Amino acid sequence: MLLLIDAGNTRVKWAAAAPGSAPGDWAAQGVLAHADIAQAEARWHALPVTAALVCNVAGAGVAEQIAAALSAASVSPQAIEWFRSTPTRAGVTNAYRQPAQLGCDRFAALVGARHRYPAQRLLVVTCGTATTIDLLDATGRFCGGMILPGLATMARSLALNTAQLPAVGDTTVAGMFADHTEQAIASGCVHAQVGAIMQARQAASGARCLLAGGAAPLIAPHLPEPFDRVGQLVLLGLHVAAGAEVA
């Protein structure tokens, strides 16, 4: 059983794929907080997992926790691939000036998006701790992208860097123009995200817009259509990449 792991800045998502299974056809999957990674050991061992493909953007500490959990699940270090951004893989060409500098989660998401929507021009928007907006042309060439603070990160930054603005935990928005400060912050942050996406969509004329990530449900009601809500693009991309050569 191949274990696919997407270790993001907030959570760790995983899926287990049987040999020969189609991308996205998973025997089991789960979501963990960083502090709970060790709790997956027994389940991974029971599947049983024999190899892993890991996309980690959460730093060395989380990588060590994942490696320890895999070892406890009897997966040898030689059977673990730490996914990296490379010049090409699985039909996606990485046109970053320094290809290795592209976040491996963004690269995996592009691979997943191309698999789901082959031969289409795509604008891949992932709304998490950071919001990334990446353009993929119909040939599979990654044309470049944008990174901005995610919805919750924007809201927290106002509380951290201003003397009189409060921390806002709920970024649900009832309307654009709010009559109290908490809702005004939420509205400003949501519509800043929407504005960036709309500008990118206009610049990427004709591209199919995909909206993914944990904050997507909060942004989607305020983003004019057309766009497609999608999930698990990183895990899907890892599954596709697992059967492709690294170049």
Image: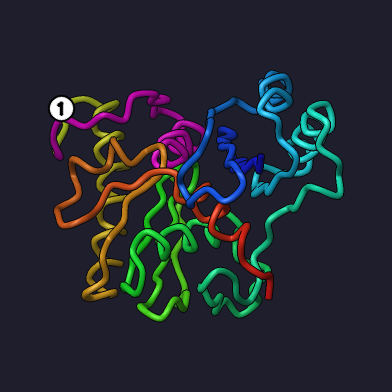
Q: x and y percent of residue 17 in the render?
A: 57, 42
Image-quadrant location for residue 220? top left
Residue stretch rendered in magenta on the structure: 151-176
Q: Which residue is drawn at 22% across and 55% down?
A: 227
Local crowd at mark 1 within 10 Å, few (<14), some, or many (≥20)? few
Quadrant of the image for the N terminus? top right
SS at circle 1: loop
**Considering depth in this image, is 67 or 201 the residue closer to the camera?**
67
Residue underneath mark 1: 179
Q: Position of residue 98 (x, y in %)?
A: 65, 76
Residue 241 percent coordinates (x, y): 59, 60
- Inspect the magenta stretch and tell me whether residue 167 lies in it: yes
Give the colour scheme shown. Answer: rainbow
Q: Going 29% across and 34% down the picture, which residue do you hit? A: 186
On screen, residue 115 above or below 194: below
Q: Which of 186 and 90 is in front in this view?
A: 90
Camera sees residue 63: yes
Residue at 51 percent of width and 73 percent of height: 91
Above-or-below relation of 124 to 73:
below
Along the horizontal axis of the image, is 187 left or right of 117?
Answer: left
Q: Is residue 79 above or below residue 152?
A: below
Q: Which residue is drawn at 28% across and 47% down?
A: 229
In this picture, is 166 found above or below 83? Answer: above
Residue 28 horizontal/vertical position (percent): 53, 30
**Tally of marks:** 1
